Amino acid sequence: MAEEICFFTKDSIIIKPPKKSPALLRMVVVVFTLIFGIYICSICLKQTSTEKTSKYLNIEVIQRPCHNYDIDRSQMPYVHYPKPKTFRRAECACNPVRLFAILSMQRSGSGWFETLLNSHMNVSSNGEIFSVKDRRENASSILRTLETVYNLDFLTSASKNHCSAAVGFKWMLNQGLIQHHKEIVEYFNEKGVSAIFLFRRNLLRRMVSVLSNSYDRYAKLLNGTHKSHVHSPDEAGTLAKYKPEINTTLLITDLKKMEVAAGEALEYFNSTRHMILYYEDIVRNRAKLVDVLKFLRLPEMELSSRQVKIHNGPLREHIKNWDDVNKTLSGTAYERFVQADY
Ligand SMILES: *[C@@H]1O[C@H](CO)[C@@H](O)[C@H](O)[C@H]1NC(C)=O
Ligand SMILES: *[C@@H]1O[C@H](CO)[C@@H](O)[C@H](O)[C@H]1NC(C)=O
Ligand SMILES: *[C@@H]1O[C@H](CO)[C@@H](O)[C@H](O)[C@H]1NC(C)=O
Ligand SMILES: *[C@@H]1O[C@H](CO)[C@@H](O)[C@H](O)[C@H]1NC(C)=O
Ligand SMILES: *[C@@H]1O[C@H](CO)[C@@H](O)[C@H](O)[C@H]1NC(C)=O
Ligand SMILES: *[C@@H]1O[C@H](CO)[C@@H](O)[C@H](O)[C@H]1NC(C)=O
């Protein structure tokens, strides 16, 4: 080996015949090994540093797509990295966002449920956006609205802009949802939108709420303003003073219609990723909300709402023609609504 190196460097350094001084030869070998080592090292360093800068350049120029290695493959269809037109997601640009929609019927507790969800720091649920007729005029205006919401460009008081981990809104079955179900289901499946069905078990209570709310729309019991949701027991008491009279001729038919509407929605949206919730179950057991956070893969957090229930206590106290209603329902499939507390 020593001979080889010696031979190799004959031209550049004058070396006297080896036998004359083995110490000098050893010295030369050591020096060359050192220089060679340093040279190789410097080449290595140069290579890694160019690699680093080129990676950095990619991020700057091509905007490398966000990638989260904590997410398992089965979840890939459900996560998004939106690039809103109206603002920058800044430090949360690479936080995955999940899309959801609360599918419900009026007076089923969806307002209360939505305030609970929105108390989570990473949830933006934008309210009943399809109550505006223009947005649900036809399938294309619905899809355009969905695109805006899910791209985080639909700004409401609920929008938590850059650090939202779940974005959605609530949608009533009669706001174009059933009418355009084909296109909507297709969109949900393509985009991986998760549907949260929220129904009320006691449809008779829902009916009382619908009638009272539509009465208040005209009567405006709270100092001349119509309120669909209240934040104090006093206000709830004022609204609950009104006892609707239920037309018993149509009662069974109307209850049946509500049931059919819910079943129809479940059937149409069966192929989407979905969960079914009942208002009464959440009232009775707040732990149900943990299931919702799990479903949306959100960090667990205590959720709260300032909304107060309007019609408390037995149903008998909230219906003017109670005896008629009770008699009409006794012996039918809906008899259970008469007794239930919620
Ligand atoms: C849908 O409604 C919008 C108005 O909101 C209208 O401009 C558009 O032409 C309609 N599209 C179809 C396909 O009818
Ligand atoms: C939730 O929001 C906080 C603060 O805005 C942010 O730091 C955090 O990364 C967000 N979490 C998720 C899962 O996006
Ligand atoms: C209505 O008016 C009463 C007194 O006139 C007041 O105590 C109450 O807070 C008002 N309620 C609302 C909802 O404005
Ligand atoms: C109940 O509804 C039926 C059918 O619409 C109607 O004929 C009847 O007059 C109503 N009864 C009351 C008490 O309003
Ligand atoms: C949804 O689909 C599953 C199986 O694909 C079926 O068992 C269930 O009955 C369906 N539900 C509705 C409401 O159609
Ligand atoms: C309903 O009517 C039945 C008699 O038909 C009576 O026994 C029952 O107590 C009534 N229920 C309520 C909650 O008033």
Image (cartoon, grey):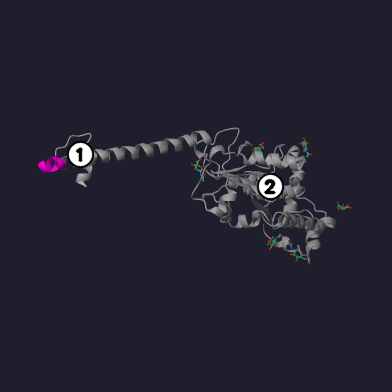
Asked if the residue under mark 2 is in contact with the one under mark 1, i.e. CB atoms within 8 Å, the reply is no
Q: Which mark is residue 31?
A: 1
Mark 1 vs mark 2, foreground winner is 1
Q: Residues within 10 Å of mark 1 (few under 14, many from 20)?
A: few
| Magenta segment boundaries in residue numbering | 17-25
Q: Which is nearer the eye, 24 or 320?
A: 24
Say which element carries label 2.
helix
| Residue identified by numbered label 2 | 187
Q: Quadrant of residue 334?
A: bottom right
Say which element carries label 1.
helix
Q: Quadrant of residue 27?
A: top left
Q: Is residue 234 left or right of residue 13?
A: right
As for residue 157 lying within the magenta part, the answer is no
Using the rendered image of the protein, determine whether residue 310 is visible from the camera's viewpoint.
Answer: no
Q: Which is nearer the eye, 208 or 269?
A: 269
Per the picture, the main secondary structure of the magenta-coloured stretch is: helix
Residue 205 at x, y percent in the picture: 72, 54
Residue 17 at x, y percent in the picture: 14, 40
Name the image quarter holding the C terminus.
Answer: bottom right
Q: Is residue 153 left or right of residue 4?
A: right
- Residue drawn 61% across and 45% down? 115
Residue pushed farthest left?
Answer: 20
Using the rendered image of the protein, determine whether residue 46 is visible from the camera's viewpoint.
Answer: yes
Residue 165 at x, y percent in the picture: 55, 44
- Residue drawn 34% across and 40% down? 44
Query: Is ligand 2 within 8 Å of the beta carbon of the residue shown at mark 1?
Result: no
Residue 275 at x, y percent in the picture: 63, 55
